Amino acid sequence: MTDSTTVVAYVALREYLLWLLDDAQQRRVLTLTPADLDGSRADWALALAETYWRRGDRRSARVYADTASVEYGAELQHVLNKGLRAQTSGLQALALAYLGRTQEAIDKGDEALNAAKLAAAPTWQQSYIQFLLARIHLLAEQPEKALDQLEPLLRTSGSRISPGLLRIDPTFAPLRGNPRFERLVNGS
């Protein structure tokens, strides 16, 4: 049997799933160390930034987002695989968005997506970066641009993004009621 720290750490490494955790599990995330998340200070800091953000603690979220941005920048100095490099840049862009540096985040997210396409990164990796960019646009309060990123994801074979995920993920609550979003998640 797997202990709860292992499960919480697994979800934390996939920051886009943190919304699945209940209050006690979120509090557990906030006690994790980089060692619990495969040793990556960047992934750890982003998980904490996202968790604090979801809990309404914007100040703490920004502190950890700053750490994540710096750490992803340091990681980029050593990443040779172009697809992984693009993904790391996309994660740094998300950290920048949590910091409130939205235009810089959008520019970096766009660059990351273009780099992934030029590198012929696997479809799942390109889709993940595009998903990050949609989330960045939501943090920047640009719902139509977020939808511009989400629409092609649902038409991409190999994308792990589905209408069902968008329907239940509270990250996309600001889009609910938008006719374009409703068509997207309801398949009409």
Image (cartoon, helix red, strand yellow):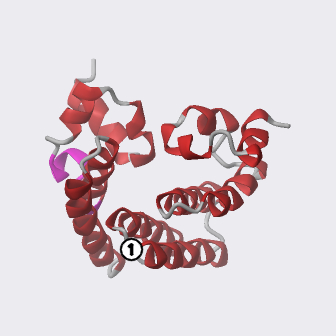
Task: Return the x and y of residue 68 as percentages of the image width and height.
Answer: 27, 65
Judging by the rendered image, the residue that carries numbered circle 1 is 101
Farthest residue, direction front: 177
Nearer to us in this view, 43 or 136:
136
- Quadrant for the N terminus in the image: top left
Residue at image coords 28%, 63%? 65
Q: Is residue 106 highlighted in magenta?
A: no
Can you tell which quarter of the image residue 133 is in? bottom right
Q: In this view, does 59 lie to the left or right of 140?
A: left
Query: Is any atom of residue 41 visible in this view?
Result: no
Q: What element carries label 1?
A: loop
Residue at image coords 28%, 33%? 8
Q: In this view, does 43 lie to the left or right of 159?
A: left
Give the residues in magenta.
33-42
- Quadrant for the C terminus in the image: top right
Location of residue 105 with respect to 32 vertically, above or below: below
Farthest residue, direction top: 1
Query: Is any atom of residue 64 visible in this view?
Result: yes
Task: Return the x and y of residue 91 as percentages of the image width and height.
Answer: 42, 64
